[in-house]
Image (cartoon, grey):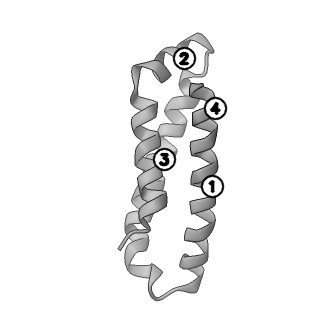
Amino acid sequence: MVEAVPFGIATHLLVKLGASTFQELGLIYDIDKDLTKLESTLSTIKAVLSDAEEKQEMSHLVQEWMRKLKDVMYRADNVFHVFET
């Protein structure tokens, strides 16, 4: 099974990026291109997480990578929360 936490956070962040509030803020602060690039990166992360499903059970390296990604995704979610506030 895909590590639910990073996958869920990536999905959550993609939804936030698609929200009109973030789109408007991107235009106001001239970061719309950066937000588009971030959205693309998060989509790629989701795809990699899907592929990691099979490999995680057999690879300690993938398990370690998933733990690190989980931490990064929590930090990204915190940054989005601060930005929203």
CA separation in Å, label 2 and label 1 = 23 Å
Query: What residue appears at the point 46 percent right and 49 percent down from the top-left corner?
Result: 10
Dot 2, how many residues are within 10 Å of its Cα: few (below 14), some (14-19), or many (20+)?
some
Residue type for callout 2: Leu
Q: Which residue carries the number 4 mark?
A: 82
CA separation in Å, label 4 and label 1 = 15 Å
Task: Look at the numbered disc 2 and give the secondary structure of its residue.
Answer: helix
With 12 as the anchor, is 83 left or right in this view? Answer: right
- In the image shown, does 5 or 62 lie closer to the viewer? 5
Task: Look at the numbered disc 1 and give the secondary structure of its residue.
Answer: helix
CA separation in Å, label 2 and label 3 = 19 Å
Query: What residue appears at the point 47 percent right and 38 percent down from the top-left corner?
Result: 39
**Mark 3 / mark 4, whichever is N-terminal:** 3
Which mark's residue is nearer the viewer, 2 or 3? 2
Q: Is residue 66 above or below residue 30?
A: below
Q: Is residue 77 above or below residue 16?
A: below
Q: Which residue carries the number 1 mark?
A: 72
Which mark's residue is nearer the viewer, 3 or 4? 4
Screen quadrant of the C terminus: top right
CA separation in Å, label 3 and label 4 = 19 Å
CA separation in Å, label 4 and label 2 = 13 Å
Q: Residue reaching furthest top? A: 28
**Mark 2 / mark 3, whichever is N-terminal:** 2
Residue type for callout 1: Val
Query: What residue appears at the point 59 percent right and 52 percent down from the top-left corner?
Result: 74
**Mark 2 / mark 1, whichever is N-terminal:** 2
Screen quadrant of the N terminus: bottom left
State which quadrant residue 27 falls in.
top right
Q: Which residue carries the number 3 mark?
A: 42
